[in-house]
Amino acid sequence: SYNILAVCYARSQTAVRDMYPYCPAAALDMAYRQPLLGRELHRLDGDLVFLQECGYAVFHKCLVPLFGDKYEMRITLKASRVAEGCALFVRRGAFEVLEDQEVLFRTAFRSSDKLRDVLKEVAAKWPDFLSLILPRMTTIFQISVVRHAATGEVIVLANTHLFFHPLARHIRLLQVICLLQQVQEMREKFQGANAGKLPRCVFCGDLNSTPDSGVADLLLRGEVPSDHPDWECSSQFAWRDDEESGLVADGDDAAAACTQRVVEAGDDDGLQAAAAALEPVSAEHWQPGRGVALRNPLGCFSDAYAGRG
């Protein structure tokens, strides 16, 4: 699993001035990085490959021609004006793809029956979240269900790139519990196809989180209390309309992003109407702290990188 740094972010003034001032411009150029990326993926030769910040043009002009003969490949673009997103490769012959699902966080969080109580308390404690912040969230989830050819085992694959902002720890908690719920529902759907056992999950992505974060606690320890320190960010974070300002996209990427906006257009009106209709939890029934207690429906995960330095 890799974040491969989308072209638009590598060219932005923020990237050049603040994030990578030590890096020569030529080394950030995708014309230089693209062959290195192809060579590295070829060398690793993984049965499953999860990418984040994969540009539309890079996917279709570079990765598909290089690897399309041996992988089932798909890309899911974020719901934004920037044509980058998550890509998932599944090796043909090693796995059979049973189902693919693309989920937009802002829609899934609003519509999940399992997260209804979370939504109502969030609406009460963070009055502007549902009307001003959630409709601007562009995060997507990729979920695939595959069958391992050698063993017949069904496995659920999940890939995402959580919201980046350093003061958005509370938002990342909501994003990850939403994805976990989507994965759990897919596991339950395919339990019968897996000899009656809930399928195991491979959960990958750029989580923009550190080991001391609530996201790590939720994944590895299985729960996060309502007074976890990360929830305090809800009183500090404010949406800036220039979150994507200064980004530079290639022509193909810009066209793809425009198409994606057309596809996703219309859900914001539904979000606004639903936010107005939601009845928040009254203050006397609030949980302690600024947040909501969360429990991982899959239990505690195993850290694939634990002990590797």
Image: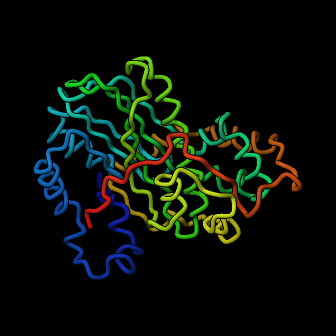
Query: At 57% from the left edge and 64% from the top edge, which residue is drawn?
Result: 168
Query: At 11% from the left edge and 53% from the top edge, which residue is drawn?
Result: 39
Q: Is residue 103 left or right of residue 121?
A: left
Q: Nearer the viewer, residue 305 or 68?
A: 305
Q: Is residue 61 above or below residue 191?
A: below
* Residue 123 placement (x, y as % from top left): 76, 51
* Residue 255 placement (x, y as % from top left): 39, 45
Answer with the quarter of the image where residue 7 lies: bottom left
Q: Is residue 86 left or right of residue 152?
A: right
Q: Nearer the viewer, residue 172 or 283?
A: 283
* Residue 113 placement (x, y as % from top left): 67, 33
Task: Tell me the quarter of the image containing the C terminus.
Answer: bottom left
Query: At 57% from the left edge and 52% from the top edge, which residue is drawn?
Result: 223
Answer with the quarter of the image where residue 224 lies: bottom right
Q: Is residue 232 left or right of residue 250?
A: right
Q: Is residue 172 left or right of residue 44?
A: right
Q: Nearer the viewer, residue 241 or 38?
A: 38
Q: Nearer the viewer, residue 262 or 161?
A: 161
